[in-house]
Amino acid sequence: MPDTPEALILEVLTGARAGERFVIEPPATLGRAAECTLHLPDAHLSSTHGRFYRASDGGLRFVDRGSSNGSVHRRGEAATPLVGDCVECELWHGDELRLGDPEDPVRVRVHLAEPTGAAVVATRSIDAVEQYADKVTREPQRLGVLYRHAAALGASTDLDAVLDVAAQLVFDLLPGATHFAVALQERAGRFPVVCARRRDGGEVDIPISRTLVRTVLEQRAGLFLTNAATEMADVRSVTAAGMASTLVVPLWTGADIRGVIQVDNRDRPGLFAADDLEVLTVAAGHISFAAENARLVARLARAEARLARENRYLKEKAQADSFAGIIGDSEGIRAVIDKIEKVRDTRVPVLITGETGTGKELVARALHYTSGRKEKLFVAQNCSALPSNLLESELFGHTRGAFTGAERDKKGLFELADGGTIFLDELGEMPLALQAKLLRVLQEGEIWPVGAARPKRIDVRVVSATHRDLDEMVQAGDFRQDLYYRLHVYPIELPPLRARRDDIPLLARHFIGRYAKEFGRAVTGFTPETLMRMKAYNWPGNVRELQNELQRVLIGRTEGDLVLVDDLSPRVLGQTGVLDDTQVPRGTLKEMMNAVERVLLARALDEHDQNKTQTAKTLGITREGLHKKLVRFGMQ
């Protein structure tokens, strides 16, 4: 028998030396330099492009020596770029190295000469496993062992437990076995040992021969070597392990080889027989199924744990931020938060009113995430975003075949939000036909999906919002009166931004801090005059307009840490102050203050269409107090 390792033959497929074959004895070098062991004169290769060497376990390795254009290692369909200094790969028979220019590489195929003494006594294909199983059924003792351990394998969902049962199964089936090892595929071409046992129950380091693994993969068959130490004397892992008789069988699912089982006898050669290989192949079929199930269970557990962490993070963030989006210290905002705290743990429908951009969805989220429903879903739908037929399906769901294109059952948002909260924005845009279905949800607590034969019970908190005057819509016949009364049980009105000007600096600093980080700007605040100008502007688009204005400012500003007056848009700068000089006549301080108060009262009345109740609420005074002021200034 030869005492040298398996030979390395390199076949050059493309490049200047295409068609040539070279026998190389590692360590050896490859590259453009003439002194390299394998001289490849192609210009896009480095002088010393890479190096071949034999690892301590006898395996062959290739190292890219930090070449300019790099190397790619390919095994079957898997290709791995070797990038950076001294990146290596393991070489198997049939592997291919692609060197240099990625578009037109020099391709070199690896051939490992088969050891001359590697005779295999018997092979058994896994495609004929049913035949071997028929033979085992005629052996009652082995059939009983298989049956007993198959039940234990089926009950095991942990991979370590499966492998423990597998080891005991093999030792019970094969009394001559002294060592048992399993290698499972980790990635393309890698089969690390994951379990190694002695018959006495101890763990031991058992190498699995790459030559045997390669043969099992190529032939999709189990192997029987009656005297491994003699027949494979030139395979170092075999001689180092002291293997005498050896069985190696694949673990598989469908057409894919997932790993191998290696069973040894290290006492004396010739202890196994061909029928031992057959029964081990049958056992491997059961072990394969159980091991793959355990790996799937582990992957599912990891996925569930990851999802649980993500859900917990999102919920904690949502709960932590439940009032964070409602920024302000004005009396109007404090009143809104007080109303949220009073109604959040009831089932009462809440109607949020206010101008566009005042933050109605933030209030809806606060109602949900500070309530007992926070563990369930919060879902939102803008009723003006979809046409009537699509909106009905989106809200209430549909059954398969309910209409053209309904290829499967679909849950609506109400069903998804069961136990939680649904937010219906721009409710005033909902068609009358859907208003009737929404009324049924509020009255009966049930939905009727499109095309369904029966309704479904649900428990959903309904929060709605609109910037339109629903009372006027009811009078005009555009909104159902009975639905209006159902929704208007507990209204929350959001004040416009111009009615809480003292909150503008708080909001502005919040948005600057948020978007400066997002846009990579060093801006940290505002000059006093800038804040004054921002407080003077009426902000018809409310908080959303302020948010958009500051985003625009930060996008255009690349220097300085303060927002200047000149950074504001002409629209915002068009209003220079709360009052013009012409509105404040000269006189004593009391006379000037009375003039200012009169102008502010007139402006507030105009903003609320002369509605004294709403004006008093915005100004933070009673209606009687407002009436007295109007009388004093002759404004009745």
Image (cartoon, rainbow, N blue to C red):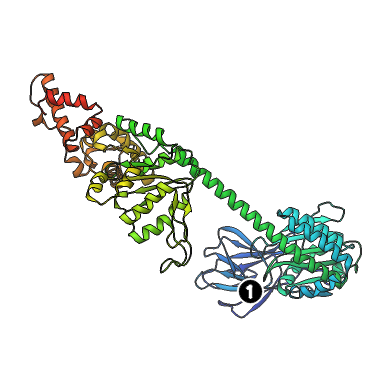
Badge 1, how many Cα within 10 Å: few under 14, some, many 20+? some
Above or below, comparing residue 596 to residue 38 in the picture: above
Residue 593 position in % (x across, y down): 14, 23
Can you see residue 590?
A: yes
> From the viewer's perspective, is residue 295 above or below residue 276?
above
Q: Position of residue 529 (x, y in %)?
A: 22, 33
Q: Secondary structure at mark 1?
A: strand
Query: At label 1, which amino acid type do we have?
Result: Arg
Reading the image, the residue beneath label 1 is 109
Nearest the eye: 248 or 2: 248
Location of the C terminus by quadrant is top left
Q: Is residue 117 visible?
A: no
Residue 325 x %, y %: 38, 39
Residue under the point 86% across and 73% down: 274
Residue furthest to the bottom: 19
Q: Position of residue 429 (x, y in %)?
A: 29, 52
Judged left or right of residue 228, residue 587 is: left
Relative side of 23 to 501, left or right: right
Q: Residue at x 12, y 22 (%)?
A: 632
Q: Can you say which quadrant of the picture contains the N terminus?
A: bottom right
Q: Quadrant of residue 608?
A: top left
